[in-house]
Image (cartoon, grey):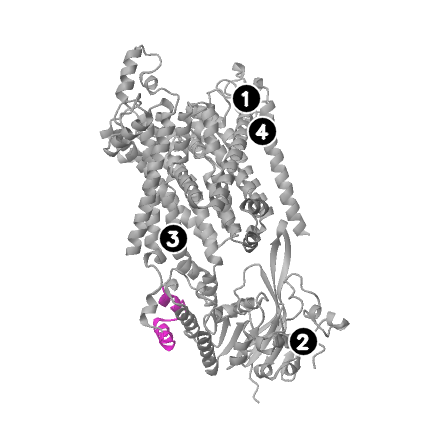
Amino acid sequence: MRNVNRRTKTLLLIGMICVILLGIAASGLVMNPESYAPDYAAKKLPPSAAHWFGTDYLGRDMFCRTIKGLSTSILLGTLAAGVSAVIALVFGILSATVGGVIDKMISYLVDLFMGIPHLVLLMLISFALGKGLKGVIIGIALTHWPNLTRVIRAEVLQIKNMQYVKAAERFGRTKVQIACEHIIPHVIPQFIVGLILLFPHAILHEAGVTFLGFGLGVDTPAIGIILSEALKHISTGMWWLVFFPGMLLVMVVMLFDKLGDDIKLLIDPMSAQE
Amino acid sequence: MMNMMKYIAGTLFRMLLLLVGVSLVSFILVVSSPIDPVEAYVGSESNISQEQKDVIAEYWGLNDPPVQRYLTWIRNLLHGDMGTSIAFKKPVVQVLEERFITSAALMLTAWVISGVLGFMLGVVAGTFSDSLADRVLKTFCFVMSSTPAFWIGLLLLVVFAVHLGWFPVGFSVPVGKAASEVTIWERIHHLVLPALTLSITGVSNIALHTRQKMMDVMKSEYVLFARARGESRWQIVKRHGLRNIAIPAITLQFASFSELFGGSVLAEQVFSYPGLGNAATIAGLKGDVPMLLGVAMFSVVFVFVGNFIANLLYGLLNPEIREGGRV
Amino acid sequence: MEHKEPILDIKNLSVSFRMYEKGLEQKDLKVISNLNIHVDEGEILAIVGSSGSGKSLLASTVLGILPKNASVTGDMRYYGQPMTIELQQRLRGREIALVPQSVEYLDPLMKTGKQVVGVRGTKEKQRLAFKRYGLQREVEELYPFQLSGGMARRVLVSTAVIGDAKLIVADEPTPGMSKAMAEEAMSNFRTLADEGKGIILITHDIDLAFEYADRIAIFYAGTTVETALAEDFGRGPEALRHPYSKALWEALPQNGFKPIPGTQPYAGSIPGGCLFAPRCLYKTEECLGEIPMRTLRGGEVCCIHAD
């Protein structure tokens, strides 16, 4: 009986995580901007029943700002993970199946992107695009593919050398046919896990870059901006401005991590053999 | 020996090739920015005439075709001239030098602490995988890998600087004190929190990696044989474990310069610590093109040096590469 | 005939693993079931079976070095003493030695000499062992990857003679070797047996076993179906006892290469009763019940129809 439980439990957990994350993303989208507007009558309040996460020096409700910020983070993460994962898929498969010069070029690009500290690269891209929100979005979306490209390339190479794929080659299947029939179906699970595990990186980088002051205006509720404002007023002792938004950010990132790991466990149980 | 030389030459060549690529990418990115460096230099409110701006643009070579500008920049770079920083009003090279010394203290401290601590924790967790200690460490690393460095810094500030008042809120030396009067203790006092921030975030990577390698070693055929020959768990860790995980751990620690630099950018922002990372942020925000390019190139060289040392050590420590094929 | 206590006596040994399958279903995988063997001083007992029949795990079981997710039942005795975990700990590397399959079992980053000494040997004993197998002094300073195939083989055997082993378990010591090398390896084991040691030789090479072993245990789907004298294999299928042994004999190249129909059951889908029943010509209703190992014509067999 324990056996069935573990599988069901994992599925249930995956479902729950999805509901929480989608819930945060959706509530941020439909949130009335009034709910985190300045309210000078309620400045610098510690957490209470009315304001769960307290209010800041302008009387803005920190809970609503945090949720709104996380929603932005998740949506941005979705875009970044989607774009980067597709780039990784295309590059990885091209690199492994075509080989030769293409493989060398893609490997060089991967090394190039990994040679620059990620934050510095994000700063450069943000600067290239005029330091606006656009720069942050494009920067995050375009820089998260190198690792996954390597993973997919290795995976495809491994499949390519399997007996049955070689057999298919001898039976005269074309490269495209083999790719569609044998390689892509096997890479999809890796791809999905890789895609989900891109979220944490994307979200953390977004938070980091906006914390440094790139991209978004000071009034936009992004976690990075909320925390950089908290830093400006850190000496006033309003600990809740630091604690809660960061805490929730960490939790969202951990949920994505857990989601990826659980899906990996379902697809590839060898990782749970002990 | 021939082997080793070939290995070093190969690695060096690949890195040089990458360096060229990085300089090109950075340059293209910076040049294609809609932000006008002259505007950024003179400031938007100043009443400098268009003619004067044109003179500056001409002086900086902004009107030349991009290829020529790139070549000029590279030529100057090779002569050790990176131009003058707009934000710092000093030669970029000088700013890099000053800032790097400040950053080096921070990064080196954090690098050593996280490396040693992470390695030890990883060995324990990997040896006793699935024990309570292992689970605690795994959870800690899991949480840490999801936590942005700057938030840890903020929490440390709130607790130790604001509430307890044990450490200063920022900067690398007491504000308003002449550099010559600052004591080493004051420097250390200012270094503790930023270094702690950077160490905490660095630990999980090396610890998890070491743990995994240790688990792989414990599952290996040679450990099975060692057990068959009567070696105890402790003897196996001492004789085979440390021997086999030291190379990957040292390699990883040197290859982590990229994360170290990224972390220091954030940590320095939190603690207003006047290091390189802080200079990078200021350059990026103020549109200081020479400085931004300078920091970017410097950071890339920094990462490359780390990777190169990692590759070199890997070759030196691994007998298969060091001594070559069969006898 | 004097009857001495066997070095190792194993009765009804079963080993199973706890595994996770696709979709996280947990199940117990039985890899060895109701196995019976014994080894006396001065003899080579060959355990012969096709690959994937779980025979290599037997070595780990005897030495007590199975992975954590394994569980063992049955009776195992060393010179009459029950084999406890503590006893195994004391014996391995001293009185029981393992000769592993390949150089993969040596630490890739430790020099050969230091490795052969191990934690229970001395430099002198290692030099003596190297001398015995014609290994030069320089070999001590080599890393495993620098050893040639023949050198590696001799280094691995030296690990077994460095202590005063009474029982040596050799796990597939010959695959990938030339005929001459395999013969050298086997005659080394023969010499060790003639010195009074007991040797368990786990192999899939019947010819080699027949040539050098005293007795041969036939291993099928995680159990021994028959233990025969080595000569029985020379005398042909009539001298053998179990239907599987007979079929195996007929499948040998020199005896007509006749394939055995059907396939060996996988661990995890082990049928009840006789494990060979699904492929057996003599199968009857009773074969599905419990079948004990019994003595027959100087050997042992696990079949109710054998006579």
> Could you give the CA–CA distance between mark 1 and mark 3, rounded to whole angstroms?
50 Å
Region rendered in magenta: C111-134
Residue B71 position in % (x across, y down): 29, 30
Query: Is residue B194 depicted above or below C50 in this figure?
Result: above
Is residue B55 visible in the rendered image? The answer is yes
Label placed on residue A106: none
Q: Chain of mark 1?
A: A
The residue pinned by badge 1 equals: A61
> Could you give the CA–CA distance between mark 4 and mark 1, rounded to whole angstroms?
18 Å
Have a look at marks 3 and 2 and say if they share a chain. Answer: no
Have a look at marks 2 and 1 and say if they share a chain. Answer: no
Find out whether the residues at labels 2 and 4 contact each other: C-beta distance under 8 Å: no
Please identify the residue farthest to the front as the structure is shown.
Answer: A172
Q: Amino acid at mark 2?
A: Pro
Front residue of A59/C222: it is C222
Magenta stretch: residue C126 in it? Answer: yes
